[in-house]
Every structure is written in structure tokens, then in C-alpha cells.
Image (cartoon, rainbow, N blue to C red):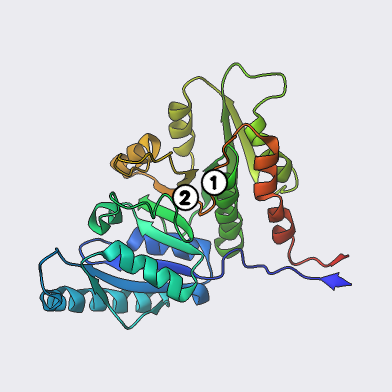
Amino acid sequence: MNRRYSTRLFRKVLVPVIHGVDSRAAVNAALLIADRSIIDLVGIVGIAEGESLSSAALPARHVRKVLRGLATSADLHAMQRIRVSHKPWDEVMQVVREESADLLIMEAAHLPLLDVNDTHLLRHPPCDVVIAGGNVPPHAGNVLISLRGGPYAELSLRLGLSMMRTSKAGITALHVSPMQTSRLGDPAFMGADKVLKNLPKVKRKTIKTDDPQRAILEAAQESDMLVMGAPAWRKGEPLSVGPIAEALLRSGSRGVLVVKSRRPLPSNMESEVAGQNAISILVDRWFADRKSVV
């Protein structure tokens, strides 16, 4: 029996357009990652507790105008209804569920406006999340993906493969390891390493250093954009994209995509099986245009 896999690595991509934030970086990221036909823009207006919903009339009209402009210029679909809520993050999550979105792309500046610090939803999101910021270009020639292992590596690679397919971007997989490693190397990276060996179009770069932040920042200067996993978020701490991403955002010289997989990190990140099982399906999807006999 012949079997053909779907070439789409994402089914539905949702980009919130929030009143008070320029959403161009998130829109550009969506265009790099996915076909226009599966990208939806949704307008969100947050209002303070105690204010009436009618107070959002003017902001809602502004957001509708912005949506129309983005939809027209980028040939995207914009939802007609503008969502107004005292809890805008809950509203975003509601749209994710209604539309069965499997990828949510937000601006880094959305986090404080959506008031997500007091919720666990970004720690356990209903879909994969990308936080976009900096100078995300409409066309990326070279994208650097910083990889270790586990579900964040899977999502990062899915983004990279989608960008190769959709926007013809060149992808470089970066692995930063300590100067002193065991004879077996970095166990958490073994799964990703095996998959990368089957992706000859993905360039590879390995750096051994005891200063991984500096190494990633220096490597990012040679690319148009950096893709990396989100830092660990602990209860009670403010949400952050991490020191490396924040440094790039402050400089404004590069675009950065911080990924958060809906699947939790394995309890043992040193497990080779955890890393390998998380991303092995990518090889089948990448060669989706080939028929295999089963």
C-alpha cells in the first residue's frame, strides 16, 4: 500500500492583533512559517476591570482598521469579530480552541498587555506557541535554530522545515555543548542529532564553550533570525523570553522566535529516548512528497 504524508507541518496558525501593539513581527513570522491559506488574524482589545465594554468602541474600530490593512497588504484572512474582554488572554485561548489552532504566534510585547503573568496557560498552553520580536524580516535568507533536545527541539525544527518549504529560507542548526562532556556527548541532543543526519539541506554548526549565551548571540549575528526554546518558567516568576532573546530584542538588529511546545518537557532531559521520540516523525514529514511502500 502506498502512503503519502501531509506536507503541512501546521494546520492552523493564529496571530492575535492586540490594541496598542505593532503586530508586524508576528505577521512576518507567520508568513515565513505557513501558507497564507491557514493563517488567521484576530483582533483583541483588553480593558481594565471595572470599565464597561462600551469603552472599547474606539479601540475596537482602530484594531479593525489595522486588521483590514494587514489582511489586504499580506493577503491574509482577518476575523470580522473584534474580541473585547477584561481578560484578553482568556479570549485568545478561547479563539485557539474555537479555531482548533495548533500554532499561536504572538509579539513579545503582548505578554504584559495580555496580563499572562498570573496564569498557568503559557506554562501549559492548548497549542504550540511562538513569541516573535525584534526585526523579523518578511523574507529570511538564513535562519539559525539553537537546539538541545526534547519537545522544544521538535517545534524549533518544525518551524525551520516549514520556513524552508514556505519561504525557501536557509536553515542552520546550532548545537552548543560544554567544553567538558562525557564520552557519549550530550545525551539530550542525541535524538535531534539522528534526525538532522537525515536532513541534508539543514546546515549544522557545533560550538563547544562554557559561555553558551555569548556563543549563541555571536552565532546569531551571522543570520537573519534566531529560533530557540523558551526558558523554564517557574511559578510566581514573571514570564520572560530569556536573556539571549531579550538581548537580541534590545539590539533590534535581528528577529527572534522563542518557541514553547504544548507538550511538557520530559522529567529527564538527559534521556536519549525523550529527545529521539519527540522529533523522529519529522523525517517522514520532510520527505512527504515521496511515496513509501508499507
Count residues near mark 2 (Cα–Cα under 10 Å), then give few for <14, some for 14-19, many for 20+: many
Badge 1 element: helix
* Residue in the picture at 45% in, 31% down: 218
Q: Position of residue 38 (x, y in %)?
A: 51, 74
Tell which of 52 and 289 is nearer to you: 52
Count residues near mark 1 (Cα–Cα under 10 Å), then give few for <14, some for 14-19, many for 20+: many
Q: Which residue is mark 1?
A: 152
* Residue in the picture at 73% in, 68% down: 5
Badge 2 element: strand
Q: Position of residue 75 (x, y in %)?
A: 42, 77
Numbered label tally: 2
Residue 44 appearing in the image: yes
* Residue in the picture at 56% in, 58% down: 163
Sequence-earlier tag: 1 or 2: 1
* Residue in the picture at 69% in, 43% down: 276
Q: Which residue is mark 2?
A: 260
Badge 1 vs badge 2, beta-carbon distance below 8 Å = yes
Q: Amino acid at mark 1?
A: Tyr
Residue furthest bottom as drawn: 80
